[in-house]
Image: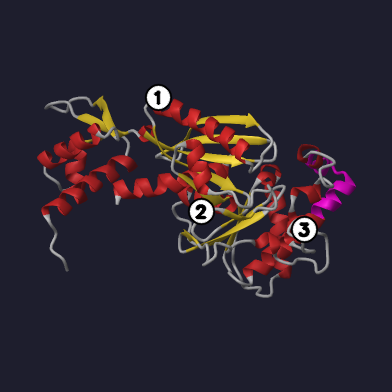
Amino acid sequence: MPKATTASIKTQNLHAVTAHIYTHSGVTKQNLQQTLGLSLPTISQNLQSLERNGLIAKGETLDSTGGRRARTYVFKPQTRCAIGVGTTSDQVTLCAVDLKGNVIAEERHDATFSAAPRFIADLGGKISRFAADLEGRGSHVLGAAFAIKGLISEDGSEVIYGNIMNNTGLQVKALETATGLRCALIHDSMASASAELWFDKTLQDAICLYLGQRPGGAVIVDGSISLGPNRRNGTIEHMTLVPDGLPCYCGNKGCMDPYCSTEFLTSRGKEHLDEFFEHVRSGDKEARRRFDTWLGYLAQTINNVRNVLACDIIIGGTVTQYLETQDFERLKAKCDRLNTFQSDTYEIRKSICGQNQEIVGAALHYIAPYVEAICR
């Protein structure tokens, strides 16, 4: 085993102090000494270093217990942030996410998406101004990550399949030129799964299904997203659910996508989801029939994927805000009837993440490794 050097020991001490302040609110030098077993001079030196870097600040002074009143120290998550970018056909959403995973700023812009150079230049300008405002408020921007509806190349440099948004060929270099920032392309379902892992540290194995206008999926194994050698693990939306069935945007027929999308529920957008679920809850027979059919297709999807990876299922996406406990119970009952293995125990649960999950998850592409680097 290599002998630890003075420099490596100092680095380890700094990371230990940082990690403790990051995970505990309002700690004192005495707390750090008791927990980490470091000397007070070493602790003081590391606290000064972290203050200079803007990562911590002095907090409140505690009441005296007989001697000098102890000063607390708090982590300052907003001194660093990353920008997550989400695009739909008619809107761009920007979210700034701090080192704790909190959204500290948000902007929405009405815009008809295009991968054309003029649009990318205009989008880059919006992001640059957003970043400049964050920097002006003392929050250094680590980078901008784009939650992409499409498959990303193995090296992460471009969109290689983007039929939904017509963004095939979109390149990181073009975005970096337009924004003046480090940029990354993240498949939106993978970004959403990153948020699952960030906000649930106990999560180990799961199949994530994100149900919206265009469904998607992700696979989590041993506490990490399993991308596969070509970044295509989890493309559950293109499994054949009904042979020679409804047409899918990919060009094939019978994929999971047209059967488990919100469009199936709303008759291809003829009504809003709000209206549809109002009809379901009021007992409308046609709406309830369509919803039951949709749950059946979703149950078939879950049964299929669990025959490959028998783990819990996490349901996220737009539709989950309308699903009630009774709906999950009905879905689980349908899955159990299809399940070959009656002794199987598993859970189907709603994602714990909130609004803009894929955008926050994209920003975590820069946040997670930064936090790991300062706290390891």
Question: Residue beneath label 1, please?
Answer: 136
Q: Nearer the viewer, residue 6 or 224?
A: 6
Q: Magenta segment: does it hold 290?
A: yes
CA gap, disc 1 to disc 2? 30 Å
Disc 2, SS? loop
Tell me where the magenta segment starts and ends, as one range.
Answer: 277-292
Q: Position of residue 134 (x, y in %)?
A: 43, 28
Q: Nearer the viewer, residue 101 or 275?
A: 101
Q: What's the residue type where badge 1 is placed?
A: Gly
Q: Residue at point 57% right, 46% down?
A: 147
Question: Residue beneath label 2, please?
Answer: 157
Quadrant in which the N terminus is drawn: bottom left
In the displayed image of the protein, which residue is found farthest to the right?
285
Q: What's the residue type where badge 3 is placed?
A: Cys
Q: What's the residue type where badge 2 is placed?
A: Ser
Q: Is residue 290 above or below residue 79?
A: below
Q: Residue at point 85% right, 41% down?
A: 270
Callout 3 crowding tier (Cα within 10 Å): few <14, some 14–19, many ≥20: some
Q: Is residue 350 toward the left or the right of residue 157 in the image?
A: right
Q: Which mark is residue 248?
A: 3
Q: Is residue 39 above or below residue 129?
A: below
Q: Residue at point 24% right, 36% down?
A: 50
Residue 353 appears in the picture as rendered? no
Q: State the scheme by which the image is colored.
A: secondary structure
